[in-house]
Image (cartoon, grey):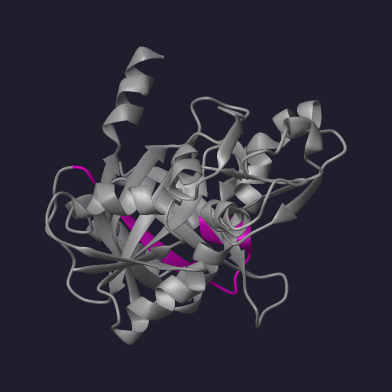
Amino acid sequence: MTYAYLGPEGTFTEAAVRRLAGPGAHRSVPLPTVPAAVAALRSGRSARAVVPLENSVSGVVPPTLGELVAHAGELRIDAQVTIGVTFALMAPAGTRLSDVRRVVSHPHAHGQCRAWVERHLPHAETVSADSTAAAARALAARGPGAEAAIAAPEAAERYGLTTLAHDIGTRQDAMTRFVSLRRAGPERPPTGRDRTAFLITSDRSAPGVLTGVLGELSRRHVSISWIQSWPRETARGRHHFLVEADQHIEHPGLAEAVVAMHRGVDSLSLLGSYPYIVDREVERERAAA
């Protein structure tokens, strides 16, 4: 199976691919952006696309939500995995921390490391990159200078960089949730640890829509794990709502709720029923907390 993912090599998304694909044979194809990974899936060049959905510190990843909304009829979430993330500051050999005047990384990494950068590099400019590994790779061919990257620790070894500082994230328990996407088709059978996601659109008032959705699920004892709004391009002041419930679509209570929810909204699209995986290291950290 071929997995397209947000690259280049050395991103946290690559680690998510390894966790989702398991020990069997698979091919991983790094691509520069989330839309590029999704485009590879939609065109048939890959069987899955693995992209980040949400970080516990910086929140949702807008390009992923945008792709889910834009292609709701074509895509399904196939699986989710949450992994712990740590960040390091790295630069070409010979660069000193006192030399750094520009720090390059993905916007979410900047958000998670802002406090450290402001404390230790108060005069440094922050510059955005498509991914943390892209920021590290861009420095690989350069000599020592005034630029450093924030990325996963393994990116320093992969791209031949020197680590200037370890564990620079604001929270040591930071986690990122990744989704594996596939083309639309029948849902996987229940595993006992599943979630189901929907895209809901309505021209009625947002409070009324959400109240109705929550009520139908609550009456059937179905828990909601996540709600996110996304602006509609064609209706100013109106939103799509992405809702995630803690059951498989075959669960009787959820299936009944979906029928009832259809009556209260303009459209409801299934985004998938899928197993939810938490990396074993994250589970151990939670148990010890």
Q: Which residues, given as a range, are shown in magenta? A: 193-210
Q: Quadrant of the N terminus?
A: bottom left
Residue 97, quarter of picture:
top right
Question: What residue is rendered at 37% in x and 22% in y?
Answer: 286
Q: Position of residue 231 (x, y in %)?
A: 64, 68
Left or right of 266? Residue 26 is left
- State the residue lying farthest toward the bottom: 43
- State the residue lying farthest toward the right: 123
Left or right of 180? Residue 53 is right
Question: What residue is rendered at 50% in x and 46% in y?
Answer: 160
Toward the viewer: 217 or 33? 33
Q: Position of residue 47 (x, y in %)?
A: 25, 73
Toward the viewer: 137 or 128? 137
63 over 287 or under it: above or below: below
Q: Quadrant of the C terminus?
A: top left
Residue 247 appears anywhere in the view: no
Question: What residue is rendered at 67% in x and 51% in y?
Answer: 143
Question: What residue is rendered at 40% in x and 45% in y?
Answer: 224
Whether the magenta-drawn stretch holds residue 62 is answered as no
273 over 110 or under it: above or below: below
Residue 142, quarter of picture:
bottom right
Q: Position of residue 168 (x, y in %)?
A: 61, 29
Residue 132 appears anywhere in the view: yes
Q: How many marks?
A: 0
Q: Position of residue 195 (x, y in %)?
A: 29, 50
Whether the magenta-drawn stretch holds residue 198 is answered as yes
Toward the viewer: 100 or 79? 100
